[in-house]
């Protein structure tokens, strides 16, 4: 692993710019997750991104203990499930027990939507609202169970709404980001407000591995497309959290390269090519009828249409 930069959060704490993602493509505890964490920590990763919804916090905790790396040396993020917006404190306690730790470094509201226990989305103005859930999360900072708090899948529209009543400005907004969905406007907004952007699906779920422009840049640096994508992500000051359960790819993802200003510009503009501006995540499936987990794109403040495509 070469030197991975640390970014400064708006409360003065640091976060490693590279983390290992723990969404395994399916929900559940597994030895694969435990092994991934052990390998990642052995390779020098010091940032883990999991979530209550991934159902694997126990395996993450076990991996951390098996690695022998001290808890305090690792930045752990977990996330509040949408079904738990009305029981924030109890939900974090459950995550802490599973992880086997007394605090998390970062606790994120996974999605702005609150869901009922049976999975139906409440409308944006129904209680618990984003503001009410955030107030409960702020309390967790006061009592030291979360060192920092943030949000995920928040648009400029929803951040504006949250900031109207927030006592603590979110430290992070975690959203999908890669050259096909660079989120330039959201990144600029977050930088202006002192919120770091974390890029999820930063290697675009390996769906860009044969893209000509990316392959050309990779070849020039004797690197892989994934290394180009991650180096671009960190180069534009976003945190990247690629998931790999393969030790060679974990190693590859932790070795960054230095891209020229011209290459950064080329990657910044890649989404402008015809048909390129889109999400790679399945939850934008047209089968969901223009909404994402129960809220329309308009309610979410996302400029997208069916299938996660940004209108030309
Ligand atoms: N907040 C949210 O709503 C949200 C949503 C999605 C994801 N996330 C977080 O972000 C993390 C990363 O996102 P993601 O898992 O969606 O996508 P990703 O990291 O862009 O891609 C993961 C996929 O790419 C493969 N891969 C990883 N490195 C590779 C490499 N160097 N070469 C070729 N293939 C490679 C992995 O397979 P192998 O394991 O076989 O290497 C896996 O199939 C998640 O794990 C999760 O922690 C958060």
Image (cartoon, rainbow, N blue to C red):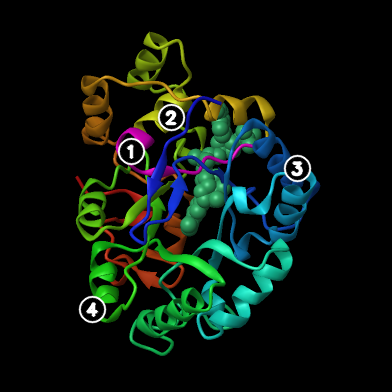
> Where is mark 1, residue-wise?
180
Q: Quadrant of ligand 1?
A: top right
- The one of 251 and 177 positioned closer to us in this rendering: 251
Measuring 70% from the left and 40% from the top, which residue is drawn there?
Answer: 36
> Looking at the image, can residue 22 be seen?
no
Choose the circle earlier in sequence order: 4 or 3: 3
Mark 1, Cα crowd under 10 Å, few <14 / some 14-19 / many 20+, is: many
Q: Residue 208 bears which disc, if any? A: 2
- Report how far apart the C-alphas of labels 2 and 4 lie in the structure: 38 Å
Magenta region = 234-245
**Residue hosting label 3:** 67
Q: Which residue is mark 4?
A: 164
Q: Secondary structure at mark 2?
A: loop
N-terminal-most mark, 1 or 4:
4
Looking at the image, do the residues carrying marks 2 and 1 touch, with CB atoms under 8 Å apart?
yes
Q: CA distance from mark 3 to mark 1?
A: 35 Å
């Amino acid at each position: 692993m070469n030197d991975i930069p640390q970014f400064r959060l708006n409360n003065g704490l640091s976060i490693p710019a590279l983390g290992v993602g723990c969404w395994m493509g399916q929900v559940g505890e597994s030895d694969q997750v435990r092994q991934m964490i052990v390998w990642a920590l052995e390779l020098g990763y010091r940032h883990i991104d999991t979530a209550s919804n991934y159902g694997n916090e126990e395996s993450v905790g076990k991996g951390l203990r098996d690695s022998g790396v001290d808890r305090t040396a690792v930045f752990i993020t977990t996330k509040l499930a949408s079904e738990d917006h009305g029981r924030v404190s109890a939900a974090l306690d459950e995550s802490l027990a599973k992880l086997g730790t007394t605090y998390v470094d970062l606790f994120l509201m996974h999605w702005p939507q609150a869901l009922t226990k049976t999975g139906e989305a409440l409308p944006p103005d129904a209680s618990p609202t984003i503001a009410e859930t955030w107030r409960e999360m702020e309390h967790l900072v006061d009592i030291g169970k979360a060192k920092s708090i943030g949000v995920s899948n928040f648009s400029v529209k929803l951040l504006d709404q949250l900031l109207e009543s927030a006592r603590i400005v979110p430290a992070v907004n975690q959203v999908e980001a890669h050259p096909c969905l660079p989120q330039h406007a959201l990144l600029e907004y977050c930088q202006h407000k002192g919120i770091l952007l974390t890029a999820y699906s930063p290697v675009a779920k390996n769906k860009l591995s044969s893209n000509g422009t990316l392959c050309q840049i990779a070849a020039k640096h004797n690197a892989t497309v994934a290394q180009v994508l991650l180096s671009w992500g960190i180069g534009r000051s976003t945190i990247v959290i690629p998931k790999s359960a393969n030790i060679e790819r974990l190693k590859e993802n932790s070795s960054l390269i230095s891209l020229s200003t011209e290459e950064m510009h080329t990657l910044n503009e890649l989404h402008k090519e015809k048909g390129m501006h889109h999400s790679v995540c399945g939850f934008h499936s047209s089968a969901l009828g223009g909404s994402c987990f129960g809220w329309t794109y308009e309610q979410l403040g996302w400029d997208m249409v069916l299938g996660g495509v940004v209108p030309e």
